[in-house]
Amino acid sequence: MVSSNGMLAIDARDVEKTFRSGWFGRRQTQALRGVSLTVARGSIVGVLGPNGAGKTTLLSILATLLTPDRGRVLVLGHDVVREAAVLRRRLNMASGRPSFLWSLRVGEIIAFYGRLYGLSGARLRRRVDALIDLCELGPYRRVPYSDLSTGLKQRVALAKSLVNEPELLFLDEPTLGLDPDVSVRVREHIARLRREQGMTIVLTTHYMREADELCDEIAFIKAGRILSRGTPGELKRQIRLGEVIALRLDPPTVAWLAEAPGVLRCVEADGWVECTVDEAEKRLPELLRALHNDGVVIRNVQVREPELEEVFVELAK
Amino acid sequence: MSWRNELLAVWAVTLRNALMGSRNVFFFFELLFWPIVGVLSIGLMTRFLELTPAQASFVLVGTIALSVINVCQLEVAYAVLLDVWSKSLKHQFLAPIGIRHLTLGSWLVGIVRSFAVFVLLTVLGWWAFDFEVLRPGWLALGTFLLGCFLTAWVVGVAVCALITLFGNRAEAFAWASVNLVLVLAGIYYPVSVLPDSIAAIARAIPLTYFLDAYRSYYGFQSEFAAPVATGLALSALYAVLAHWAFLAAIQRARRTGLLLKMSE
Ligand SMILES: Nc1ncnc2c1ncn2[C@@H]1O[C@H](COP(=O)(O)OP(=O)(O)O)[C@@H](O)[C@H]1O
Ligand SMILES: [Mg+2]
C-alpha cells in the first residue's frame, strides 16, 4: 500500500466543493460531489466533461488555488491544504484562457514568474531563452502581452507553466479556441514533455480526439461526479459501445441487420451502414455469411473502434 | 525559504511594478499633475489669506504629505490591483511566494515614486512660496517621510485586503479611505480643532503624530508628549494588523473561490 502510494502523483478521496454566492451565500452550486481520483507518476490523465461539470474546480483544488470543503487530497505526497507552500514549488498550471499583465512583454512575463520560483542571473536568462525557443515565441519576445493573438497568449501561458520545471503540470483546456494546426503542435509538445522529462500531466478538455490521442487514462466527469474512468480503450469497452462494422452494400439497406445476433445498433450514413456490435471478431464472419446467403453484394467493409465522442454522448445521457 | 529567494521574490515584484509604471500613461498624471495642482492651489490660497511663513509651511506640509501618501499607497495597492485588472491573480498565488513579497516589493517602488514627488513638491514650494523644508533638520525630515511611507503601507495593504475580500467593488471605497485618514489626521489644521469624539479617532492614527512632530519645528506647540515614538508604535501595530487582514482575506478567497473568479 505504502509503496504503491509512492507511485501516485495525485491521490484524492471524496472531494467535495460547494460555491456560495448572492446575499449571505444563499445561492449554492455543488461543483464537486465526492470526487476520487488517482494519477500515477509520469502519466497523462485527461479529465473530460461538458461545461460546468467541475473540471476547473477539480484542477484548482489539486493545484492549491482552492480549498476543498471535504475530502483528503495528497499531491506529490503532500496535503494540498496543510502543505501547500512546499507543494507550489513542484507544480504549475496553464489555462486555455490565459491572462497576464497587459503591458509586460513576453520575455518579461516569463522572467517575472521565473524569479518567483527562485531563478536569477544566468540561470534565469537560460531558462527564459529555452522556453521562448520551445514555445516558438522568438519573434514575439519584445511584444507586449496585450498585442498578442489568442494562440500566442496560450503559448506564453504554456511557457510560464514550465518555468519551474514542474513535476506535475495542470493544463486547463490547453487547446481551447486554437487553430487545428496549432492544436496539433501543442499536443505534440505535451506528449514530448512527458516522454522526455517524465512529467505527470493532468489536463481537462472537451475535445474527445485530444483525450484519445494524448491520455493514458481518462476520467469522465459530469455534474461534479466522476462517472467513469479508464484507458480510452477500456472506456469504450466498459460502457459496451462495442466496435463498429461499417458496410457498403448493394442494395444499400438491409432491414434485418439491426436484429441480427450481437448487433447493438445500426445507423446509415453516406451510403454506409454502421453496425455497432459487441465483438467484431466473432460477428463479422457471421454477418458476412448471412448477407451473402441473402444475396446482398458486399462492396466494402471496415472495422473500427468507436470514437470517444460517441462514448461521451452515451455517458452524458 | 532562503534569504536569497525572499529577496528575489521581492525584487521580482519591484521590477514588475516599475515596468508597469513606466508604461502607464497615467503615470505622469499621478506623479506630476495632481501633486503640482495641489501645491499651487494651496500655496496661492496661503497668499490670499496672508498667512505667516510658518502658517503657510504648516498647510504646505499637509498638502505635500497628502500627495506623498497617495502615490505610495496606490503603488502598494498595485500589489494585487494590477493582477485584478489583468485577471492574472491566480498565477501569483500558484507560485511559492507570500503576500509579504507582493506588498514589500510594491512598497519599494512606492517609496521611490513618492520620494520623487516629495522632492518635486518641496522644490516647487520653496521656489514659489518660500517653503523651508529643511528647517526641522535632516533627522526630523527623515522621520516625517518614514511616517508617510508607513502610513501608505498600512493603507495600501488594507486596500489589498478589502479588494481580496469583496472583489473589485471595494476599489472605490478603498480610494475614499485615504482621504478620510488625512482629514482625520489633520491635513490643514491641528487635531485640536476637531470635535472631541473625532479627535479621539485622530489620536488612533499614526500620521497625526508624524505631522504634529514635523510641524513643531515651524513653531507650533506639539500636542503630544512623545509624538514620534507613538507614531512609530502605532504604525507597527497597524502594519501587523493590515498584514494579518490581507493574509486572512487571501485564505478566505481560496475557500470561496473568489481568487478564481477574479482571474476569469
Ligand atoms: N469561483 C467560483 N465561484 C462560484 N461558482 C463557481 C466558481 N467556479 C465555478 N463555479 C461553478 O461551479 C460549477 C463547476 O464549474 P467549473 O469547475 O468551472 O466547470 P468546468 O471547468 O467543467 O466547465 C459551475 O456551475 C460554475 O458556475
Ligand atoms: Mg473550466
Image (spheres, coloured by chain):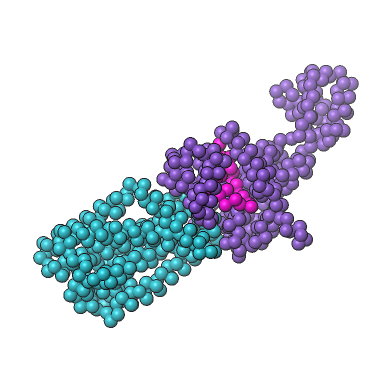
* Residue drawn at 25 percent across, 73 percent down: B212
Position of A284 relative to A135 (above/below): above
Q: In which quarter of the image is the N terminus of chain A?
A: bottom right
Which region shows up in magenta? A158-178
Q: In which image quadrant can residue B184 be found?
A: bottom left
Is residue B98 inside the magenta stretch?
Answer: no
Is residue A160 inside the magenta stretch?
Answer: yes
Give percent across and percent down for residue A260: 85, 30
Letter of the cyan chain: B
* Residue drawn at 63 percent across, 46 percent down: A203
Q: Quadrant of the C terminus of chain A?
A: top right
Position of B63 relative to B209 (above/below): above
The reply to whether residue B121 is in sight is yes
- Nearer-the-camera pick, A287 or B178: B178
Chain A colour is purple
Q: Is residue B241 left or right of residue B202?
A: right
Give percent across and percent down for residue B189: 21, 70
Position of A284 relative to B252 (above/below): above
Q: How many labels does the image show?
A: 0
The reply to whether residue B80 is in sight is no
* Residue drawn at 86 percent across, 25 percent down: A288
Position of B232 relative to B260 (above/below): below
Q: Which residue lies furthest to the front in this view?
A: A122
Give percent across and percent down for residue B138: 26, 69
Give percent across and percent down for residue B204: 34, 74
* Residue drawn at 24 percent across, 57 percent down: B120
